[in-house]
């Protein structure tokens, strides 16, 4: 068993892949073996998390997740804990055989199976749905919202959330989609993933790690994630995605004989100024990030009516007119604060820039112009000439490019990022909680680093500059995107540890790289 951290990358498996792994493993084991291992793992973690708990409530559902809960209750009872089990009852097809066997053992052991949770529990275990609540997760599909059992689930989840007692979810927090991290439709109006939890949250993912735990609502709902593989080898199944950790992000080695030309030039194109709006700050944030992320030289080309010729706080930045940029040799970061003026320079940028990061207003301009979309798509045919493209949209920008809504993008972030990567044949960073990095022909990554300190203006500009610096140093586009995204989040994690309570502004983020 291991606690999931940002140190190591981990393979992630969706529901379909997990079911295949489960079937293969079960075919070579005695009946009930996997559930017994699962129950023991849950009980061991519960004892480690709450060794002094007096009353443990285990809420069991109608499928195998409930069976895991019954098994855990048995172990905790044998280890001297006061255990109370609540059970929704079986589904329309009855309990699966292994789960029914575990339930009968609980009854035989004299463990209380109550209709209501105990009033004085100081630790609780969510064994209601697991992956069975997701489409395709169970033979019968997700529970029927009209059934009394489903109503009981909702009441019990509310009771767990309102209590200050720690809660451990088995495999997956009930109501969270294992593949997408979206909330199940049966919880409309009371979605468990949207409930404010008073106590600490833990999730023990069993057999495989699921993508939904690590992006969008999954990160908040799951809390601290632990993993037990149940002694099953999963190497025969290709991962559905990867959880990106520090081990896949290599910092460049700098030889003593290096010079500034060794680490590439980054050109920031954006920061439009008009009589009523001045957005040079966005471009300067991207430039500062590129500088601190290790680019050899950083050029800034501001659009519109800006007269800025030097940044006295960072005199290393070199200002140029847009026309003076050497797009073929420089890595171009285009769009940060670009406003309406960015549209006029995009045709040349898309056609000429060899290494290109597109952000913010550049993405919005492309979304609204079919000719720019064609130019972007045409870059893929020049990959052998060294052309590389990274798009860094937030969910609304991604929705505009896909001609959908941000809610649809957020409902399946892995799918949306993959669609964008396929549409434009480019590397895509779909920003947000658990940023997704996708590329044609690559298994997507979900970033493990970062926190809510990044939810402030300008941090996206910083990420674009960091991606530009990684490209300029010679990394391929996918690796550059992964390195920038992970380090961007890692700085925020370090800040939360070393300066708790202090706001992390975008300029602080850039200088802390």
Image (spheres, rainbow, N blue to C red):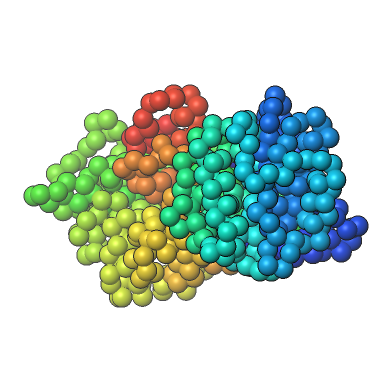
Observer-nearest of 199 and 497: 199
Q: Which residue appears at 28% of the width and 45% of the height?
A: 282
Tell me residue 348's x, y (percent). 29, 66
Which residue extends farthest front? 115
- Counting the numbered discs, the total is 0
Q: Quadrant of the C terminus?
A: top left
Q: Which residue appears at 38% of the width and 26% of the height?
A: 502
Left or right: where does residue 25 sit relative to residue 258? right
- 469 is higher (above) or lower (below) than 406: above
Tell me residue 89's x, y (percent). 68, 56
Observer-nearest of 260 and 151: 151
Observer-nearest of 480 and 405: 405
Tell me residue 446's x, y (percent). 55, 52
Q: Which residue appears at 79% of the width and 64% of the height?
A: 23
Displayed quadrant of residue 326: bottom left
- 317 is higher (above) or lower (below) than 145: above
Left or right: where does residue 346 sit relative to residue 198? left
Does residue 475 appear anywhere in the picture? no
Displayed quadrant of residue 106: top right
Displayed quadrant of residue 352: bottom left
Q: Quadrant of the N terminus?
A: top right
Left or right: where does residue 176 sit relative to residue 204? left
Q: Which residue appears at 73% of the width and 36% of the height?
A: 83
Left or right: where does residue 269 sit relative to residue 251? left
Tell me residue 236's x, y (percent). 78, 62
Does residue 416 appear anywhere in the picture? yes
- 278 is higher (above) or lower (below) than 420: above
């Amino acid at each position: 068993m291991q606690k999931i951290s940002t140190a190591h990358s981990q393979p992630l498996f969706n529901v379909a892949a997990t079911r295949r792994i489960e079937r293969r493993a079960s075919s070579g084991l005695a009946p009930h073996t996997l559930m017994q291992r699962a129950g023991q793992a849950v009980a061991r973690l519960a004892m480690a998390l709450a060794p002094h708990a007096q009353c443990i409530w285990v809420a069991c559902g109608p499928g195998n997740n409930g069976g895991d809960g019954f098994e855990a209750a048995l172990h905790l009872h044998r280890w001297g804990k006061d255990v109370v089990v609540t059970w929704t009852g079986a589904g329309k097809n009855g309990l699966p055989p292994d789960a029914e066997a575990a339930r009968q053992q609980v009854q035989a052991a004299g463990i209380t199976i109550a209709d209501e949770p105990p009033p004085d529990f100081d630790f609780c275990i969510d064994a209601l749905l697991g992956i069975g609540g997701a489409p395709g997760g169970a033979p019968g599909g997700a529970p029927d919202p009209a059934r009394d059992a489903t109503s009981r689930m909702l009441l019990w989840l509310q009771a767990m959330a309102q209590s200050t007692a720690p809660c451990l979810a088995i495999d997956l927090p009930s109501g969270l989609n294992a593949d997408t991290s979206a909330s199940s439709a049966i919880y409309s109006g009371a979605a468990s993933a949207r409930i404010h939890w008073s106590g600490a949250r833990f999730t023990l993912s069993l057999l495989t790690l699921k993508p939904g735990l690590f992006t969008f609502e999954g990160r908040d709902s799951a809390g601290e994630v632990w993993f037990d593989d149940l002694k099953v080898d999963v190497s025969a199944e290709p991962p559905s995605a990867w959880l990106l950790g520090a081990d896949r992000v290599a910092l460049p080695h700098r030889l003593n004989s290096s010079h500034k030309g060794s680490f590439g030039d980054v050109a920031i194109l954006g920061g439009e100024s008009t009589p009523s709006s001045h957005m040079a700050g966005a471009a300067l944030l991207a430039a500062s990030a590129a500088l601190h992320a290790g680019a050899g030289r950083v050029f800034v080309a501001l659009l519109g009516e800006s007269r800025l010729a030097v940044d006295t706080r960072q005199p290393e930045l070199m200002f140029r007119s847009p026309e003076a940029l050497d797009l073929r040799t420089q890595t171009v970061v285009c769009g940060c604060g670009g406003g309406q003026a960015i549209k006029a320079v995009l045709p040349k940028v898309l056609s000429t820039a060899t290494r290109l990061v597109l952000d913010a207003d550049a993405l919005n301009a492309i979304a609204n112009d079919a000719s720019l979309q064609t130019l972007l798509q045409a870059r893929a045919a020049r990959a052998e000439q060294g052309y590389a493209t990274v798009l860094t949209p937030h969910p609304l920008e991604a929705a505009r490019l896909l001609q959908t809504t941000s809610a649809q993008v957020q409902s399946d972030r892995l799918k949306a990022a993959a669609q964008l990567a396929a549409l434009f044949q480019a590397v895509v960073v779909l920003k947000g909680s658990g940023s997704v990095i996708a590329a044609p022909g690559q298994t997507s990554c979900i970033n493990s680093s970062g926190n809510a300190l990044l939810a402030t203006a300008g941090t996206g500009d910083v990420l674009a500059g960091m991606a530009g610096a990684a490209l300029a140093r010679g990394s391929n586009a996918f690796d550059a995107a992964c390195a920038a995204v992970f380090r961007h989040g890692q700085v925020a994690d370090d800040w939360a540890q070393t300066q708790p309570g202090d706001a992390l502004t975008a300029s602080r983020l850039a200088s802390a790289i």
